[in-house]
Amino acid sequence: MQLSQIAAIVGGRLVTKSGVGDTVCTGANPPDQAQPGQITMLDDPKKAAAIAPRIESSGVLAVVTSSETEAISCAQIVVADPHEAFAKIVAHFRPAIDDTPLADGVDPTATIHPTATVHPGVTIGADVVIGPRTRVRPGVVIMPRCKIGADCVIHPNVTLYEYTELADRVIIHAGTVIGAHGFGYRQQNGRHVPTAQLGYVAIESDVEIGAGATIDRGTYGATRIGEGTKIDNQVMIAHNCQIGRHNLLCSQVGIAGSSRTGDYVILAGQVGLKDHVTLGDHAIVGAQAGVMDDCVGNQVYLGSPATPQREQMQIMAVERKLPEMRREVKQLRRDLDQLTSRIAESSSSDSADSKTFPDHPDRSAA
Amino acid sequence: MQLSQIAAIVGGRLVTKSGVGDTVCTGANPPDQAQPGQITMLDDPKKAAAIAPRIESSGVLAVVTSSETEAISCAQIVVADPHEAFAKIVAHFRPAIDDTPLADGVDPTATIHPTATVHPGVTIGADVVIGPRTRVRPGVVIMPRCKIGADCVIHPNVTLYEYTELADRVIIHAGTVIGAHGFGYRQQNGRHVPTAQLGYVAIESDVEIGAGATIDRGTYGATRIGEGTKIDNQVMIAHNCQIGRHNLLCSQVGIAGSSRTGDYVILAGQVGLKDHVTLGDHAIVGAQAGVMDDCVGNQVYLGSPATPQREQMQIMAVERKLPEMRREVKQLRRDLDQLTSRIAESSSSDSADSKTFPDHPDRSAA
Amino acid sequence: MQLSQIAAIVGGRLVTKSGVGDTVCTGANPPDQAQPGQITMLDDPKKAAAIAPRIESSGVLAVVTSSETEAISCAQIVVADPHEAFAKIVAHFRPAIDDTPLADGVDPTATIHPTATVHPGVTIGADVVIGPRTRVRPGVVIMPRCKIGADCVIHPNVTLYEYTELADRVIIHAGTVIGAHGFGYRQQNGRHVPTAQLGYVAIESDVEIGAGATIDRGTYGATRIGEGTKIDNQVMIAHNCQIGRHNLLCSQVGIAGSSRTGDYVILAGQVGLKDHVTLGDHAIVGAQAGVMDDCVGNQVYLGSPATPQREQMQIMAVERKLPEMRREVKQLRRDLDQLTSRIAESSSSDSADSKTFPDHPDRSAA
């Protein structure tokens, strides 16, 4: 689709250096995921300088923005509401299929490799692709347009929402749900109105996901799980998260929206991550910790809020001694007060003495 | 069914002002949910005064009780074990169907609106009603007597236990389970014996529930989710909870039995609520907090046990400084001891001096 | 299979007292689960003395070990890598069936008691046995070689992986997954390689498991849930755990690998247990607590790390007063410094006075 056509669809004004709008745009993605030839979005003009380097280096074709900006050199489509306009563009490239009824069993438009094993009770939607030697167990539902690579195993009763992508050798255990709508709402007249959830989930090669886990789709682009990462049962990964390669995410971990982890990150059981935090490579977070801020890599973090191990261990050591410390503080007060009053008495008796000097000149005169 | 018939079923003594027992009772519900014309239960005579106003104002027809009470003016059925008797009555109005085998596919007694889309792989039990334009995805199991409104979407592999009620525009994501038995047991001869779990789940309009969530049925009446409330993935809501309207319950929140939230309550990720607590309107609870007591509304709560934000922030600020504070306490002790001994020495030298006065009269005499 | 055959399969050296290797071995299990006539493993020769009593008393036939040990009197098969060898032996007795495609519906080799009720939409694998009066709801998938007793209820969309054993009167609620692979990996060339997960899950009689729970299979033997234990929704129990009898595990509890609980243990909501910890009989752990070490029974534990109630209550009481305590410490410092400088002044004025003595001989001379 040409940029000029996209501008027309969203009722926007196209600004290009050449003045020509016939360049063909091949896709739409958020700034951190946009590929060469694609269009992206600048939701806040104040962020222009911050995202400009990424846009310049990525070969992005155009930006949807609410006001023309000098900071970005590529084509711009200027609209009143960039989110609304960008949602329209994304939906053009990845049409919503929520309302399409599913065929019984395997849709005739699906492409299943002859060496794949799909159980008869499985539902496979339109345009799904399944690679060689992949095994799909009973009760699995694969919604339209999912792409599944080679040698994957999808255990019973798993649900893959539309557009989910699994690379090769991905294992998904029973009851897990990939690609449900992100938990994003804006309030309007006292009601929570869902925001666009037009993205999808991309799972790279050699990822294993446990039973009863949930990974939500991105808002516009992909929620991504990096190559070789292992995810335990009942882990929750929210929309737009970018999980690095070779992570270990233990059971019942919860990661809120748009957070990122580097490579070789380990999150122990029941850890929680706030939204929009970033963990560096080789960061390790101890069980039940709550990560509230970015964490540099090659460090161990404990506690809620999560704190570098050394510091947190010191804090915890003192916490154990708090009752004793409280008694000591009370004792200090008593001792100090006693000392103070003893000195006051003694100095008042001193000063009484002192005063006696003039009163009893005879004494000094003694 | 007439009150006299109910009394006969449970082997109870009917006490009415009129002395007549032919009034027709239309249902059975716990005191906080009982409607006009229904029967309710007073499980402990000591609570009579407390629940009397609700009973008087609600138009309740009768109360099952272990001893006749003056505090309540409506009809009373006096029995030895009110729980056992009330369970029998509830089961009369909402018969247990656990043992009924389900038909394959859609039961012929189900009423499915012609505009609804039900995937062929779905199981729908006896007497289920499904409203206009509602879409039911593959792998969904809807047990007997569920009532589902208009424009709902039930995603793949969801289970609705018997008697579940969804109003209009309810969305339930994949793998979620509504209406399982509450976790209620009493100990008997060293074994945990399940208590009656005869209630159901009622979900009001415009509720959205994420993937892998679980909401248990009430003991006698409804576990209720209020209109417009949004529930994220892997949230757990236990039996008898009454969730208000327009709440936001983030991922992995757990709410124990019989708790209540007001309207516009927000619970962040991994929050836990103890059983039988109440949160006021617009209460906000921060991630991983543990609510142990009732919380008034229009306040932010943090920590475990959850504490008003201001107070908790102060506590947390000091916690970060605990190692420093401990050193300061130790230093205070050293400084104080040093001062004390210095004073002791000086005063002992003073007193020594003093003593020397008489011993060295020459000095004072100098 | 004879011991000599087993030794040949793993390429090991068989050491027996009699020198004869024709004794028949009936199974393979880890040391704590091995039965008479079975073979077990000693993965670290240093543990020989520790596990010797269990091996001697259990009637175990032989041990796979990396070096011959005097500490153990039974037959030994000496190999380079005991884990690899033992995995081969276990796989001989309990062959992996991951790659076997499942038949549609009920496999002809399954044995279903005529009084059992199996919904037509259920998938039942090869060699499964289902006992009298057991009910299996729609959407359930029972993988090959599971053994299910009498009077069980398996609610919709439950998945039982291969070799799962349910005794009698076991109830499993919707969406629960029993027997998925344990979360065990070793790192090799920068990648996480799954370790053997060849065990299974054994659930004893009268256990009830809530909705959306996950219980992983053992590494070589059984993850076991003891008789009469009740497990709430969304509980996670990792590989090799041995849960005692008549426990109550509340919602969202997470138990890491190889942990053990005694009888009548209660874990409140969202409690986490570290791997390899043991809780004594009648231990109670409060909501959201994190158990990091073994806990003796007949005690209540609170907090993270979990601490005996009395101690933790004292700590928490002081935590609430931390801001006040901090002010007091600061005030103590001010008061002490003031007192110190007052004394310094007074003693310097004293000493000044003292000094004045010699300087003003006239005064003492007065």
Image (cartoon, coloured by chain):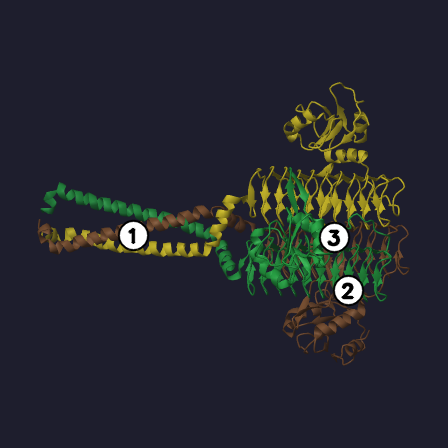
Chain colours: A yellow, B brown, C green
Residue under label 2, please give it.
C149
Residue B40, image x, y percentages: 73, 70
Eye-nearest disc, 1 or 3: 3
Residue A340, image x, y percentages: 31, 53
Q: Are marks 3 and 2 in contact (CB under 8 Å)?
A: no
For disc 2, the chain is C
Mark 2 secondary-structure assignment: loop
Residue A39, image x, y percentages: 75, 29
Q: What residue type is labelled 3?
A: His
Reply above or below: B129 against A145. below
Question: Between B23 and A207, which is closer to the camera in this rendering?
Answer: A207
Q: What residue type is labelled 2?
A: Gly
Q: Do labels 1 and 3 share a chain?
A: no
Per the model, the C-alpha gap separating discs 3 and 2 is 25 Å
Quadrant for the N terminus of chain A, please. top right
Q: Are marks 3 and 2 on the same chain?
A: yes
Left or right: C321 with respect to B136? left
Quick one: label 3, few (<14), some, or many (20+) residues within 10 Å? some
Mark 3 secondary-structure assignment: helix
Q: In the rendered structure, find residue B340 and report the number of the disc placed on it.
A: 1
